[in-house]
Amino acid sequence: MRKISAVVAAAAVCLASGAAATGCSGSAATDERSAGQLLDDAYRTMKSLKSVTVDGDVRSAGGKRSANHLTTDLRATCTFKSSSESGAALEQIRIEGTDYIRPNRAYLEQWSGRKTPSAAEPGRWIKKPSSESVPGDGLSDCTWPFTAFGRAKKSGAASVDGRRAIALVVTDEKVENGTYTLYVAAEGKPYLLEVDYKGTDFHTTTTFSAFDEPLEVKPPAEDELLDLSGTDG
């Protein structure tokens, strides 16, 4: 999913120069920054992005699994999809102050206790103001909390989708039975590539890609929208 052309190009330069050029070693062992400095650089870089794609995978101790996919400008425009192994899925498009939401039938049945339009049909998008969204309703607000936490220490060199990285183990007093491992790009800009959390109740893996790539988010066509005229909502 991530491009590695820059890595290949850098390797070619190093080979041509006999690997004597400054920075050609590119290993975690030669990076003199502390774990804290690495994370600060990574968070600063991520906060400055104009767009990014975030993929999440959640596995519970009981074996249940869910996933989500977010492409966002980190402000007010994004596309989001969540799904579970039960087949339930929810799609969302947010453009400035408007949400377009499309749950599939399995999702509607799973959350039948929630207020949903009585005329809801699979394949149709529901249009509503994003101001009506509340925490816990399954929608994304298009942002991501790139905020430092806990205490970090270096764990050595690693690789994320073929990209060289530095692994950092982060422990937090607020999380008694879990450990985070964060992977920061070892070459080029210090992007945060992955966050892996392992706890007693669940295991999550969050990967970041498509840094600053062009973002094209468009609303659904008019004939794909659910006509709610004459309904109670």
Image (spheres, grey):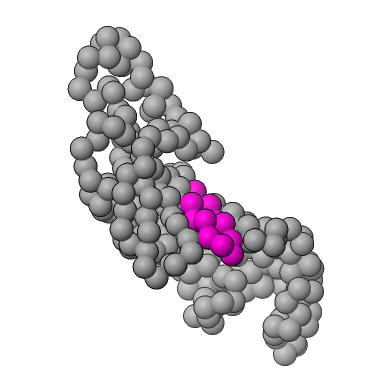
Q: Count up the numbered dots.
A: 0
Identify the main secondary structure in magenta.
strand
Residue lying at 52% horizontally and 67% vertically, measured from the top left: 140
Q: Is residue 26 above or below residue 179?
A: above
Q: Residue furthest bottom?
A: 232
The quadrant holding residue 30 is top left
Is residue 220 visible to us here?
Answer: no
- Using the image, determine if residue 96 lies above or below residue 11: below
Task: Locate residue 107, reporting x and y percent.
Answer: 74, 69
Along the line of sight, the residue nearer the viewer: 71 or 221: 71
- Identify the image quadrant of the N terminus: top right
Instruction: Give whichever of 75, 173 is nearer the camera.
Output: 173
Asked if residue 25 is positioned above or below residue 197 in the image, the reply reads: above
Residue 112 location (% of width, % of height): 76, 80
Q: Is residue 178 visible?
A: yes
- For image coordinates 36% across by 15% down, the residue present is 12
Q: Is residue 197 magenta?
A: yes
Q: Quadrant of residue 25?
A: top left
Please tell me which residue is depicted at 76% across the width and 60% down the height of the picture: 87
* 63 falls in the magenta region: no
Residue 159, given in percent of the width and then of the height, sits at: 45, 35
Give residue 182's position: percent from left, percent from top.
Answer: 40, 49
Location of the C terminus by quadrant is bottom right
Q: Which residues are magenta?
A: 196-207
Side (left or right) of 81 relative to 120: left
